[in-house]
Image (cartoon, rainbow, N blue to C red):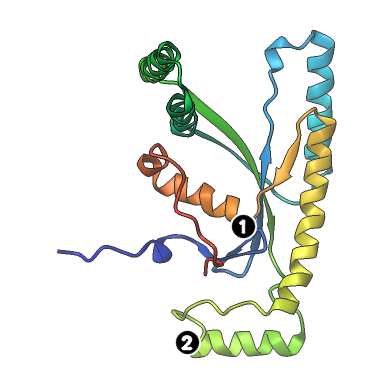
Amino acid sequence: MAQAQASQEILDIQEIRDGVLLLKDGSLRAVLMASSLNFALKSADEQTAIILQYQNFLNAMDFSVQFFIQSRKLNIEPYIETLKAAEARQSNELLKIQIAEYIEFVRAFVRAANVVTKNFYAVVPFPPPIFETPKEGVKKLLGFFSGSGAGGRAKVMPQEKFEEYKNQLWQRADSVIQGLVRAGIRAVPLNTEELIELFYELYNPGESEKGKPPEITQRVT
């Protein structure tokens, strides 16, 4: 029987640091969460303006951006727990019965209607230069031809170099945010904890319906 691979071997993510994804190939990613826009409810002039602004936004970019939509079953457990707490504090028996019936109604409605939530994200990349100096380029080429640079674990990026690349990444992210704002869409970057939660839910969809993922206080490496 083949041995199951660890999730670290499957994912391209080497590390999550200061709200930035560091991939195994040395490139960086910022993830922006974007608001939705009900395009159908806009007037014809508003729709035309939105399309033109979005077109200008895409034409102004000199780097690629990935957009993706996450659809998942609505998790009502935090809301249910709030209602249960209110039921426990209630001294009026009639109101306690009404709260209990309301809890069952909400559960039955969500189950029958199969309510889902949609989250919208934009992923902004930054690939560091392959050869920053001629000397470094020679070292990498020698390592490649000798085979010493292949098959090993990706090296941890020094903090000084990370800060330099991160600043350039956030410059790209800011330009994406400003471009989306002009099209009527708000976007904010995810921090480290939010990135961990996002990937936990992506790879554990069943667990995310039970409640919040386990609290993680240390940096993921």
- Amino acid type at mark 2: Gly
Q: Is residue 37 left or right of residue 174?
A: left
Please state the horizontal and vertical placement of residue 75, each as a whole percent of the image. Answer: 45, 32
- Quadrant for residue 18, please give it: bottom right
**Pointer 1 residue:** 192
Q: Is residue 176 left or right of residue 2?
A: right
Q: Is residue 185 above or below residue 129?
A: above
Residue at the farthest left position:
1
Q: Are marks 2 and 1 in contact (CB under 8 Å)?
A: no
Residue occupying the point 76% across, 71% down: 163
Residue holding disc 2: 147
Determine crowd level at label 1: few under 14, some 14-19, many 20+ residues with C-alpha closer than 10 A. Answer: many
Residue at 38 percent across and 18 percent down: it is 100
Provide residue 89's location: percent of width, then percent of height.
47, 28
Q: Is residue 54 visible?
A: yes
* Amino acid type, callout 1: Thr
Label at residue 132: none
Q: Nearer the viewer, mark 2 or mark 1?
A: 1
- Give the quadrant of residue 25: bottom right
Q: Is residue 100 left or right of residue 66?
A: left
